[in-house]
């Protein structure tokens, strides 16, 4: 609910987006971890998955920002 309130500010929007992704990834991706990863290494797998999804989101935003800057010039 806070994302629309901070959307005019790019740093605040990105901060809230990362927090949102970090909290949602656990709920969305646990079935795969339970099916394919042993019990002893589930914490590590969850951490890698969280880092990967967050890094992918940040890289995609950076790529789109670069592309839109090139279009405007």
Image (cartoon, rainbow, N blue to C red):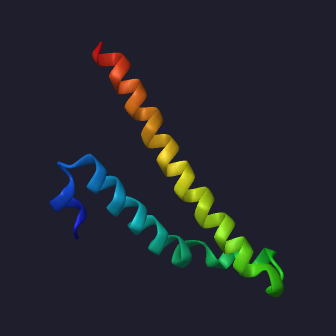
Q: Residue furthest top?
A: 73
Compared to residue 10, the image places residue 20 above or below, namely below
Instruction: Indicate the quadrant containing the N terminus: top left, top right, bottom left or bottom right.
Output: bottom left
Q: Position of residue 67 (x, y in %)?
A: 41, 25
Q: Quadrant of residue 66?
A: top left
Q: Position of residue 46 (x, y in %)?
A: 66, 73
Compared to residue 73, the image places residue 26 above or below, namely below
- Count of all numbered marks drawn on residues in the image: 0
**What residue is shown at x 43% (from left), y 42% (from top)?**
61
**What residue is shown at x 46% (from left), y 72% (from top)?**
24
Q: Residue furthest bottom?
A: 39
Q: Is residue 33 left or right of residue 52?
A: right
Q: Is residue 18 left or right of residue 16?
A: right
**What residue is shown at x 62% (from left), y 57% (from top)?**
52
Q: Is residue 67 left or right of residue 31?
A: left
Q: Quadrant of residue 73?
A: top left
Q: Position of residue 49 (x, y in %)?
A: 65, 65
Q: Position of residue 43 (x, y in %)?
A: 70, 80
**What residue is shown at x 55% (from left), y 49% (from top)?**
56
């Amino acid at each position: 609910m806070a994302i629309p309130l901070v959307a005019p500010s790019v740093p605040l929007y990105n901060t809230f987006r990362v927090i949102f992704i970090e909290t949602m990834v656990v709920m969305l991706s646990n079935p795969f971890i339970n099916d394919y990863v042993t019990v002893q290494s589930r914490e590590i797998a969850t951490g890698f998955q969280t880092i990967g999804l967050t890094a992918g989101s940040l890289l995609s935003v950076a790529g789109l920002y670069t592309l839109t800057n090139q279009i405007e010039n």
